[in-house]
Structures are given as C-alpha cells and as structure tokens.
Amino acid sequence: MSGRPKQAGRYVLRLGSLAAALGIWQLLTSLDVDLWLRFSQFPTVADVARAFADRVSGPDYWTDLTDSLTRILTGFLLAAVLGVATGVLVARSRLAEDLLGPVLEVLRPIPAIALVPVAILLFPSNEQGIVFITCTAAFFPVLVSTRHSVRALTPVWEEAVRTMGGGRWRVLGSVVLPGALPGIFGGLSVGIGVSWICVISAEMISGQYGVGYRTWQDYTIVNYPGVFVGMVTIGILGWLTSTAVELLGRRLTRWLPRTSYMSGGRPARRVRGTTTARAPVAPRSKEDVPHDQLV
Amino acid sequence: MTSSSEVRTAGSSGTRPSDPSGVRPTDSPGARPTDSPGVHPTDTSGARPASSRTGAALALREATLGRPGAPVLDAVDLAVSPGGILTVVGASGCGKSTLLRTLAGLLSPLAGEVTQDGRLLTGPGADRALIFQEDALLPWRTLRANVELPLAIKGLPRAERRAQADSWLDRVGLAPLARQLPHRVSGGQRQRAQLARALAGAPRAVLMDEPFGALDAQTRAGMQDLLVEVLRGTGATVVFVTHDVDEALFLGDRVALLGAGRLTAVRDVPRPRDRTTHDDPARTALRREVLTSLGT
C-alpha cells in the first residue's frame, strides 16, 4: 500500500505535462510569436476551447463522433476477427500459407488510404468504403503479429495437450489462441492506431459526417479553431480507444510473468490483490512444508 | 557392447522372469503384443485385466525410430509389461527422447511397429500421458486448471473435474497452491503439477522424459519417492527416461540401456527399492554394467 502516494504523484506528473504543453501553446499564440515558425495566425487555446464549447452544444458534433466511432469499431472488429483467423491459418497450415501468403505479401505494402479508388469501385456506398479502408489498415498488423506469435508458441504445450487426447480444435482453443494472445494484442494495439489514421483520412476524402469530414470542412471555410477542435477530438478518441484495447489486452494476459520494472503501475497492485486475497500462500499445510523447503 | 540378439536372451535370464511387472523382451513366449481383448482405453480402474498378464502394455517390434531421413534407433524390440516401471538410460543424444516420443505417438516409427495392448499406435492419445523435462504446464492456467485440462478433454462436467483435480493436487502436495499460476511456484512444484496433470487423465501408460533432470539432488530424491507413492494403485505402466544411473536403478523394475543407435540390454533391477544400501552385490554389478554401457 506504500505505492499509493507514489501512484498519485505519477498522475500529478502526467496532468502537469499536459497542462505545460497547453500553457506553451497559449503563450506562443497569445504573444503572436513569429520566429521562423509563425504562431500569429494560430488559434489560441482559449479560441479553441470556445469553439469546442460551441460545437459540443450543437447536434452535429455528436453525429460526427458516433459516425466516426461506428466506422472505426466496425472496421477494427472485422479486422481483428479476420486478422486473427487468417494469421492462425497461415501459421498452422502449409497449404494456407502457399495459397494466401503471396497475395497477402503483395497487398501488405499498399497503404490502406491508397485503396480509396478500389473502395469507390467496389462498394455501393461511401460508408462501406470507409469501413473497408479502416479494416484493411488494421488487418495487416493483426495478421502479421498473430502469425508470428502462433509460430513462436512453445511446442511442448501443444504436445502436452495432444498426449491428453486433445484434437485439432482443442489445441486451437486451449493452446494456440491463449498462447498467441500477447502477440495478438500487440497487433491490435498497432491496428487501432492505424485504423484511426485511415478512418480520418477516408472521411476527409469521401465522408459525409464524421470527425475527419468536419475537420476538412472547417479547413476549407478557413475556420481554424474548428480544425483544432477536430484534431483534439481525434486525439482524445484515439487515446481512449487504444487505452481500451491496451486494458483489455492486459486483462486477458494477466498470466504473463511481469518483470519488476513494470510493477510500479497497475499490474503490481492486481497481483498483490489476487495472491493475498484468494490463494493462501503463506499458511501452507504441514505436510507441504518439508517439500517446500526441498523445492 | 552387447548385440541386439543378446538383448532377447537377457530377459529370460533375468532374476524374476515370472514377475508380471517390469519388462520382457518380445521373444519370451507370452509377450507377443497380440492378445488383449476387452482392454479399452477408457478402462481406468487400474485393475489389470487377466489377459494383459501375458500381453505387453507397450511394445516395439523391429522398430526403427527417428525423424524421416534421420533414424536414431534401429531394430528396437522391447515389451513393457503392464503396471511396471521401465527406466531407460543412455548417453545424451542416443535416442531416449525419440523412443519416448514414439511411444507417445508424437513420432511415427520409420519401420516396424509400436503397439499398446496389442493395438497399433497411430498417434497421441489420452491413454499415454507424456511428462516433459521442461515446463509443459500452460502458463495462463492455474495449477488446478492445468490438472483439469485432461479431464475437460474427456468431457467431464465442471464440478467433477474440479473435485478430481483437487484430489490429485492434494496427492502431490500442491493443494494450497491450486490457484497459483505456474510461474509463481518453484520448478519442483511445477513438475509435481505436471505429474498430477498426467495422472488425472487416468492414462494406462505414463511416459516420463527426464522429468526430474532439472531439479537439484534433494528435490529429485523427494520427487522419486512421491512418484512411487502416487503411482501405487493407479496400475499405470511407466516408461521413465533418465541419464542418472541411480535414479534408473531406484525407480525401475527393469532398466533398458540405449547406446550406439541400439537398445543394447534390458535388465531386471534387484528389489526392494532402496537408496541407502550399496553392498548388495547384484545391485552393484548391475550399476557397474549400466555405467559401463554409458561409457563413464
């Protein structure tokens, strides 16, 4: 419990860093600093905050927000399912690797946003096109990290399950998926970030409503505070969604041994909670003690 | 170096040829792995069916073992009688693990045949549990959930598999650690959990690949005693691979020697099991023979 004040200190530090960044912004813009970088045309923090307050009270802001979120969640979830499934398939089956591998490797280097023409040709509506681009963006990081982590699984895990009479599906469910989960979440974390980049870009190009669309609209009508409201919104949404992925990943891979340098944050408190509350490690039964001294 | 033809006679000249436990070369009359009707993989009672008294629990006939293109062991004839412990000794790289993985069904023999209770092995199965030297517990499952795994594969309902897993954990002295993750307990405790997991599936054979190899001497002795104790009453046949001569002679009812790509000898081990007396001439002679075969 000695970690509490330390923990609070860290949050103060984090808030302080944000506040300092905003302070510097406000200072540079309100003083109209023009030293090669020109801040005189730049909206101040106060301008942006005022524009933000206006936007939040209007109906369009929330439509934009939910549109963008729906697009990214649909695309990202599709990518997660398809990426994990394809990654496992390619890693576990030589036939699948030979059939899908070349196609995937050729498609992989193409930036998802370069697929806008493809999306326009393929899909009847803009909406589906944006989801397609978002999905493609997140698909490859998930695929690649799934493939790598499935290939890197310790072979004895699978052998142990097979010698217990476990079949193909049991190995998949009890060894491959849980064992690859840390790597899969690495891919998902990268994927959600790339998804945001692509959903915003796609909205700027072809969207109707959406945070990206609104930001671009504001730019074309020279409403700079509005542009910054869009950027701040993108930043906050991106941060929230990747934190959600990160937290879910940490929760699902709690079993990973944590090294001590990670123990300052959440993991340490959680470990302490589970071990002391549920498993009575200290008061061992009498017959266990000699064994334990041996072991 | 003993030739493989001498191996076949070695069994019949053993000290207790009529003992139902231990190993008998396939050439002895009753050991043909052809007859064990009425024996099913689901028979987990531990009671030995009358017919298996003469049949082998596990048998290799004229088997060549190894990976395709890289045979490791040639012309292996070996029959493990039900309920006994066969220890397998040999220098490292001589094919001990290959033998065990073939018996487990993870490797197919390159030639010859491998049978369990007279049935040809086609792959791994719940009737042959494998215990690894390295840590083979699933690290995301608690010790209890690991022990529950073979029971879940068998399709037992949740409550029942929990009860059985707890009882096995209790038997190996891990009951207080049931909710711990493998990386939070010691190496010896992990091997005990592996043992519990293997036995929970009620296999008819347990194949152990240097399971105590990474443990210190004290822990190892404790684990050997524990193994003998928990095996009692299961009726499981054990094939135990080790590079430790004293471990082989302490645990084995019989000891098989591997060397130079062959099974060179199978010997009975004098009983009772004893770690302390070193003046039994038969035991001393056997120990010398095993050490000689290892080239030490």
Image (cartoon, rainbow, N blue to C red):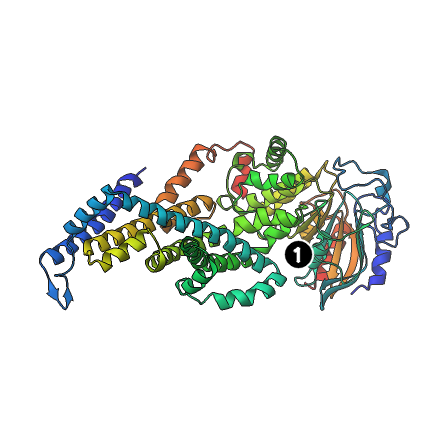
Residue at the extreme front: A124
Secondary structure, mark 1, is loop
Side (left or right) of A291 relative to B117: left
Q: Nearer the viewer, residue A26 or A271?
A: A26
User: Where A176 falls versus B4 (above or below)?
Assistant: above
Q: Nearer the viewer, residue B77 or B115?
A: B115
Q: Chain of mark 1?
A: B
* Percent x, y of residue A225: 19, 53
* Quadrant that contains the N terminus of chain A: top left
Q: Would you say residue B211 is visible in this rendering?
A: no
User: Where A289 falls versus A184 (above or below)?
Assistant: above
Side (left or right) of A251 relative to B147: left
Q: Would you say residue A29 is visible in this rendering?
A: yes
* Percent x, y of residue B39: 81, 41
Residue bearing the label numbered 1: B243
* Percent x, y of residue B156: 65, 35
Side (left or right) of A193 relative to B288: left
The answer to which image quadrant residue A132 occupies is bottom left
- Classify 10 Å Cα crowding around label 1: few (below 14), some (14-19), many (20 and above): some
Residue at the extreme left: A31
The answer to which image quadrant residue A86 occupies is bottom right
- Looking at the picture, which amino acid does disc 1 mark? His
* Quadrant that contains the C terminus of chain A: top right
Q: Nearer the viewer, residue B31 or A33?
A: A33
